[in-house]
Amino acid sequence: MKIGAGVLVLMILISGALYSQQLDESKASQAVKNQLSKLRNEIQKKQYSFQVGYSEAMNLSLTELCGFRVPDHWQATAKIKNLGELKPQTLRNEGFTLPPIWDWREHNGVTAIRNQGSCGSCWAFATIGAFESLLKLKADTTVDLSEQHLVSCNEEGWGCNGGFWAFDMLVAPGAVMEKDFPYVASDVRCGGPYTHPFLLSGWSYINGEDEIPEVQLIKEAIFQYGPISAAVYVGTAFQAYTGGVFDKDESKSSGWLNCSAAAKEPNHGIMLVGWDDEKNSWILKNSWGPSWGEHGYMYIQYGISLVGYAAAVVY
């Protein structure tokens, strides 16, 4: 199909409006500018492979952005199965070799980038995102489901101050449409009653208990089940990321503002939608809007910053 120059310009303008990567750094606060300067000096000194810049996420504190917390009874919440004995093991038995690069964005397996705003509801976005991807892949339908329903209606006391995977709410009573309970980035009351047009069949941790599965097992789960929910440890470098391969292990660092002083537990819920062995990296989908990262995504090196913690699939 031949596209006229005027139409092409319009497409570029629309694309820029929807997917503008970085904001104008000259409009950032002095504190943010100072932070970016320090990060760039460290990146140059230690020869990291990523870039940092100004995005909407830089206007918020990490406390506001990070909301993943593991409940005391977390093991009891999952239908735990050893996926290594399910489909992934079947792949190996049949001699199947995973491709060196797999990206569900290229296979109609992801929905649009969202923005959690100043509410620590990353756990809800990672939960909903996995189900939305499942519906695209298994039912060939694109839907916008309500994260606010999980934030406001869960019975665990989770909300903008943090939470965990809420897949059981999608099993029963089921998901609520975004239009029926729009996201407001706040701990508003549940309200209702709501209709629940989509029910999740089930979910499972990839590796059972409080662990980060092996890279191969995560790959197999992503390939077989679609984009997965997982956690990662986030610090200021992650917050400021705008491109490249993120290779700074912030879970072992000090001297930067972190979400938790101990830096021993993951603090942010995300999705993993693929991998790239040439970059030795996962393809991470975030919920900080399209101005963060590479249009809302990140390449993050295997094995750093606790990435992959509590990885879970839906089916």
Image (cartoon, grey):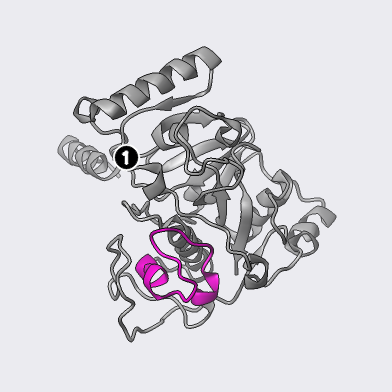
Q: Quadrant of the C terminus?
A: bottom right
Task: Determine if residue 144 is in view.
Answer: no
For residue 44, side relative to residue 195 (left or right): right
Task: Determine if residue 266 is in view.
Answer: yes
The amino acid marked with disc number 1 is Ser
Q: Position of residue 5 (x, y in %)?
A: 18, 35
Q: Position of residue 89 (x, y in %)?
A: 79, 58
Q: Residue furthest left?
A: 6
Circle 1 sits in a helix, a strand or a loop, which is it?
loop
Q: Position of residue 230 (x, y in %)?
A: 57, 53
Q: Residue furthest top?
A: 45
Residue at left offset 40%, top offset 55%: 120
Q: Quadrant of residue 149?
A: bottom left
Q: Which residues are magenta?
A: 144-170
Q: Quadrant of residue 197?
A: bottom left
Q: Position of residue 302 (x, y in %)?
A: 64, 37
Q: Is residue 152 magenta?
A: yes
> Which residue is more in the foreground, 141 or 123?
123
For residue 282, side relative to residue 125 (left or right): right
Packing grade of label 1 (10 A; few <14, some 14-19, many >=20) is many
Residue at left offset 84%, top offset 56%: 93
Q: Residue furthest front?
A: 261
Q: Is residue 219 magenta?
A: no
Residue 232 lies, with reference to residue 137, above or below; the image says: above
For residue 1, side relative to residue 287 (left or right): left
Q: Quadrant of the N terminus?
A: top left
Determine which residue is flagged by label 1: 291
